[in-house]
Image (spheres, grey):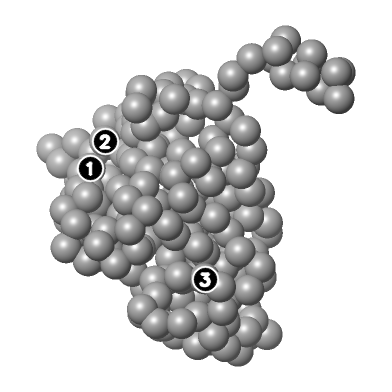
């Protein structure tokens, strides 16, 4: 016991002060892209044709963050003249159509004030479903339970049973074998309930897009309330989305 107290005093308080204070990420982090709509069309087409995810619409000069895996190839090919990835990790949206962006996203807070803040108050319990993903999204979600992020201080927790949950947090491309499990878990959550699609896989299929072995778009199975893009979404991306949508 004395050793535990000693270690606690030596280490001090390590929990992040975000969101009360801004937080900076490592310079190599790729967040919300900045897009130059005046870029030469030939360069835009090169990026669109080379994108492994078919995430770039050359005609509108927009990028679909629901498909994008933030590989940075478009930034490299264009030398930053078409797309530059910023360090803005605030990527969550309430409407899937907003993920097709020219470099900006709507505020989540306005939507949540009208829909969920009064409904869930200061408590949100979520059941995590790993629907055949690579576990990267799950790992970066689990990080939120560490002392640095301390998700529970915001009244948000992941629970073991869907019957104890207010909603589900789904990651992975939803394989054919997981389709029934996702639906049954959703049905087990008492109403009213929310559904979160986290990561490119659950939003669009991600790197597995087009495969016959996956469902891909979660919203083709059940209604989705919140989309959190990324491959995987940074813990701060998830935290920002949860805080601004539900709190």
* Residue located beneath label 1 in the image: 103
Q: Position of residue 180 (x, y in %)?
A: 60, 89
The quarter of the picture where residue 18 lies is top left
- Specify which label sits upstream in the sequence, 2 or 1: 2
Above/below status of 115 relative to 47: below
**Mark 2 residue element:** strand
Residues 119 and 142: in front is: 119
Is disc 1 surrounded by few (<14), some (14 to 19) or many (20+) residues within 10 Å? some
* Residue located beneath label 2 in the image: 34
- Specify which label sits upstream in the sequence, 3 or 2: 2
Residues 45 and 61: in front is: 61
Residue 210 in view here = no
Q: Is residue 14 left or right of residue 192?
A: right
Q: Which mark is residue 165?
A: 3
Above/below status of 140 relative to 215: above
**Viewport quadrant of the N terminus:** top right
* CA distance for labels 1 and 3: 34 Å
Q: How many marks?
A: 3
- Point out the frontmost of discs 3 and 2: 3
* CA distance for labels 2 and 1: 5 Å
Q: Position of residue 93 (x, y in %)?
A: 29, 56
Above/below status of 128 relative to 101: below
The quarter of the picture where residue 160 lies is bottom right
Marks 2 & 1, CB-CB < 8 Å contact? yes
């Amino acid at each position: 016991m004395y050793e535990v107290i000693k270690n606690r005093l030596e280490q001090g308080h390590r929990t992040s002060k975000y969101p009360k204070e801004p937080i900076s990420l490592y310079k190599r982090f790729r967040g919300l892209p900045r897009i130059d709509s005046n870029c030469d069309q030939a360069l835009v087409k090169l990026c669109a044709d080379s994108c492994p995810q078919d995430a770039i619409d050359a005609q509108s000069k927009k990028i679909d963050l629901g498909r994008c895996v933030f590989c940075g190839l478009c930034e490299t090919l264009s030398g930053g003249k078409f797309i530059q990835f910023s360090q803005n990790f605030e990527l969550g949206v309430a409407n899937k159509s907003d993920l097709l962006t020219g470099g900006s996203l709507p505020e989540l807070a306005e939507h949540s004030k009208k829909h969920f803040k009064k409904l869930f108050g200061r408590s949100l319990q979520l059941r995590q479903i790993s629907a055949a993903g690579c576990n990267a999204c799950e790992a970066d979600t689990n990080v939120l339970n560490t002392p640095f992020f301390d998700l529970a201080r915001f009244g948000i927790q992941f629970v073991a049973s869907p019957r104890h949950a207010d909603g589900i947090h789904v990651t992975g491309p939803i394989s054919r074998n997981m389709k029934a499990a996702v639906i049954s878990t959703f049905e087990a959550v008492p109403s009213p309930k929310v559904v979160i699609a986290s990561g490119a896989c659950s939003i669009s299929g991600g790197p597995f897009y087009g495969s016959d072995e996956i469902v891909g778009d979660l919203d083709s199975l059940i209604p989705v309330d919140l989309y959190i893009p990324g491959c995987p979404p940074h813990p701060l991306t998830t935290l920002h989305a949860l805080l601004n949508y539900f709190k």
